[in-house]
Structures are given as C-alpha cells and as structure tokens.
Image: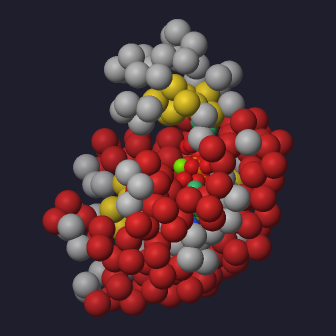
C-alpha cells in the first residue's frame, strides 16, 4: 500500500505513521526526520537545510524531491510506504507522480488529517522527543513517566528547534499557502480520504484504518 499522510504541523502525522508501520509492515518516509538527521550530522544537505527549517520555511523542492526519489528506490519500499510530510508543494506532488509512474507504481490513498489551530498549537508547544531513540511524547497528552526522560530507553527528551511559538505560526502559514492546495489536488485525483484528527491517538488510528479499508 502506497500512502501519503497529509496535514498541518502537529496534526499527528508522525504519531499515526509509527502505528501504521507496525500494522502494515511498510516504512515511514518522513522528510522532516531525514532532514533533521542531516542537520545533526552536519552533512552538506543538512547545512543547507538548517536555515530554512529553523525559520519554519520549506527546504527547496529539488532537495526534498532528491531525498524521496532515493529513498523510494530502497528495497524496503517494495511492499509499500508511508510518506509523512512529503509532498508539501504542487511541484513536489507532480515530481512524486513522475517518479512513481517511472517505477510502475501509484499512490493508493492520501489520508488528510485535520484539527483546529488551537489544538495544533497545544500539540506543538508541548511536544518532546527522545534524543536517543526518537520516541515521541507530549508534556500533557502523552507524558513520560519521569519528566525529561524517555520511558523506552532512558534517553534525554528535547524540544524541536522549530517548536517555538513564533516559528510554529510561520509553519502554519506556510502550510496554508503552499501545502493545503494539495487537498484539492489529490481530491481531483480521487485518492483523498479525510479523517478528523481530533480524539485519542488510538481513536484516530481506528478512523484511518476504517477509511483505508473502505469502511467509511
Ligand atoms: P516535519 O518534520 O515534516 O514537520 P511538520 O509537517 O511541521 O509536522 P510535525 O512533525 O511538526 O507534526 P506531525 O503531524 O508529525 O505531529 P506529531 O505526530 O509529532 O518538517 C519540519 C521541517 O522540515 C519543515 O518546516 C521544513 O522546513 C522541512 N521539510 C520537511 N519536509 C519537507 C518538504 N517535503 N518540503 C520542504 N521542506 C520540508 O504530533 C505532534 C504532538 O501532538 C506530539 O507531541 C504528539 O504526542 C501529540 N499528538 C499526536 N496525536 C495526538 C492526539 N490524537 N491527541 C493528543 N496529542 C496528540
Ligand atoms: Mg512529524
């Protein structure tokens, strides 16, 4: 199954993708995670991307298209994949379509998640992640047992650089201007499945599984 998770910053794309990996045995491709790893490792791509990411702006299309094209060619994507945070512009969506058709593949479902802006702000300002294993937390909605310490591996929890309120507001504006048009783009292609992102993590997952199975 070839899947895209579409939606604004903080809506729960990463949280839901992690559950879908286990369910379907297909990998998550998060361009945000790949870029953050490149920034941490100080690779040439990371050095180039850092300024855009810290400002809450999009990294240039050609950079992210190259990342995804390379990743989709890996053997673990044979059975399918979950794209999280890509595509984010119409040129990225066009490029993805070309790459996939060159491989004899297509997108099966675009799950479009939505919640209101106040909820997005709460989710993003309270988000924490483990610096060692990457597990995700929220100070109010999904806290670790010991504040600042990962339940799974004991690693330190950190707040993402772009989860400061001013940067969050810019990311939300960038989403509206550049990414929201993909809702009608994929609607016209007949692959859009809309899901309410409000509710418990498990409740939203159940809704996603229902739309993927055509039960709703
Ligand atoms: P990226 O990493 O993709 O960030 P994003 O799209 O802004 O999305 P987030 O990761 O912030 O949110 P999410 O939807 O994954 O939410 P999560 O599950 O964590 O991109 C970062 C940057 O990289 C971009 O700004 C850009 O610079 C660059 N970039 C990346 N891709 C690019 C591309 N294609 N083109 C150009 N540039 C690109 O959940 C958030 C919080 O809410 C967590 O704390 C979680 O625990 C909590 N939560 C989740 N679900 C629930 C729930 N149901 N109830 C209560 N809390 C919940
Ligand atoms: Mg994410």
Image quarter hosting the C terminus: bottom right
- Please tell me which residue lies in front, 144 or 27: 144
4 displayed left or right of 23: right
Q: Quadrant of residue 23?
A: top left
**In this view, 10 is above or below 70:** above
Residue at 79% x, 43% y is 165
- One can see residue 35 in this view: yes
Q: Quadrant of residue 194?
A: bottom right
**In this view, 140 is above or below 53:** above
* Residue found farthest to the left: 75
- Please tell me which residue lies in front, 100 or 129: 129
In this picture the colour scheme is: secondary structure
Residue at 46% x, 76% y is 63
180 displayed left or right of 165: left
Residue 84 pos. (x, y %): 48, 58
Residue 19 pos. (x, y %): 40, 41
In the rendered picture of this protein, how many numbered marks are placed on residues? 0
Residue at 57% x, 13% y is 147
25 displayed left or right of 178: left
- One can see residue 117 in this view: no
Image quarter hosting the N terminus: bottom left
Residue 125 pos. (x, y %): 72, 36
Residue at 65% x, 55% y is 54
Residue 34 pos. (x, y %): 41, 57
């Amino acid at each position: 199954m070839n899947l895209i998770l579409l939606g604004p910053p903080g809506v729960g794309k990463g949280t839901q993708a992690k559950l879908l990996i286990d369910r379907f045995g297909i990998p998550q491709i998060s361009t945000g995670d790949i870029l953050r790893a490149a920034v941490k490792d100080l690779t040439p791509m990371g050095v180039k991307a850092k300024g855009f990411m810290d400002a809450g702006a999009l990294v240039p299309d050609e950079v992210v298209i190259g990342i995804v094209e390379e990743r989709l060619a890996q053997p673990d994507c044979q059975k399918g994949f979950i794209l999280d945070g890509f595509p984010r512009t119409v040129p990225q969506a066009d490029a993805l379509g070309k790459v996939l058709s060159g491989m004899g593949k297509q997108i099966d479902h675009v799950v479009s998640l939505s919640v209101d802006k106040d909820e997005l702000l709460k989710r993003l300002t309270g988000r924490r992640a483990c610096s060692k294993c990457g597990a995700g937390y929220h100070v109010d909605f999904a806290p670790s047992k010991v504040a600042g310490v990962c339940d799974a591996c004991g690693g330190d929890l950190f707040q993402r650089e772009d989860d400061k309120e001013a940067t969050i507001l810019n990311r939300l504006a960038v989403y509206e201007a550049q990414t929201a048009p993909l809702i009608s783009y994929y609607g016209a292609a007949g692959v859009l499945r809309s899901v309410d992102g409000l509710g418990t993590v498990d409740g939203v997952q159940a809704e996603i599984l229902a739309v993927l199975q055509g039960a709703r």
